[in-house]
Image (cartoon, rainbow, N blue to C red):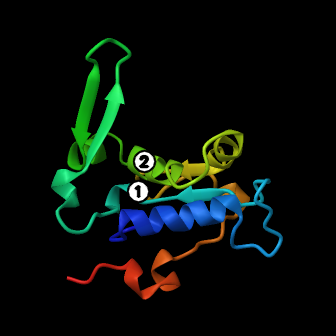
Amino acid sequence: MANRPLGRVASEIAHILLGKDKATFEPHLVMGDYVIVINAAEVILTGNKMNDKKYYRHTGYPGGIRERSFEQQMQRDPARVIEKAVERMIPRGPLGRQAMRNLHIFAGPNHPHEAQNPESIDIKTLNKKNIIRN
């Protein structure tokens, strides 16, 4: 996921998780594949979103809203950034929760799923806009 825009990566992941890339797609079933994301720490944002984007959470107490900037969240847990982006692109409810169980995100290049022989998909080759030019 190095040097790939967050939204483009998340939309491709959501597409694969739901199985929309298959000829046998059924909207009421999760027919997608398991997705393993590596190098989550290297995802980027375009424009001024690096400074403006905020992540909110609530402690459960009155007045307990807390916010983090994109940079703070990337330092704390870069996998959570991609997880939230994908989660917000799939349907809410039992179908979405089932699809999210098939997503595994890792900040670095190593993952423990080598025994399953995962296929590599290069997001860059799917669309010419999927890479940022300097």
62 left or right of 32?
Answer: left
Decide if residue 112 is in sight here: no
What residue would you read off at disc 2? 79
Does dot 1 land on a helix, a strand or a loop?
Answer: helix
- Looking at numbered disc 1 in the image, what kind of residue is underneath it? Ala
Does dot 2 land on a helix, a strand or a loop?
Answer: helix
Q: Residue 116 location, x and y as percent?
A: 72, 58
Tags 2 and 1 in contact by the CB under 8 Å rule?
yes
Q: Distance between the Cα atoms at labels 2 and 1?
A: 6 Å
Indicate the quadrant where residue 30 lies.
Answer: bottom right
- Looking at numbered disc 2 in the image, what kind of residue is underneath it? Ala
Q: Residue 129 location, x and y as percent?
A: 39, 83
N-terminal label among 2 and 1 = 1
Looking at the rendered image, the quarter that the C terminus falls into is: bottom left
Q: Residue furthest bottom?
A: 128
Q: Which mark is residue 40?
A: 1
The 10 Å Cα crowd at callout 2, few under 14, some 14 to 19, many 20 or more, is many
Q: Residue 35 location, x and y as percent?
A: 62, 58
Up-down: is 55 above or below 48? above
The 10 Å Cα crowd at callout 1, few under 14, some 14 to 19, many 20 or more, is many
- Which residue is drawn at the image coordinates 25% and 34% (left, top)? 67
54 left or right of 6?
Answer: left
Looking at the rendered image, the quarter that the N terminus falls into is: bottom left
- Which residue is drawn at the image coordinates 65% and 70% (left, top)? 119
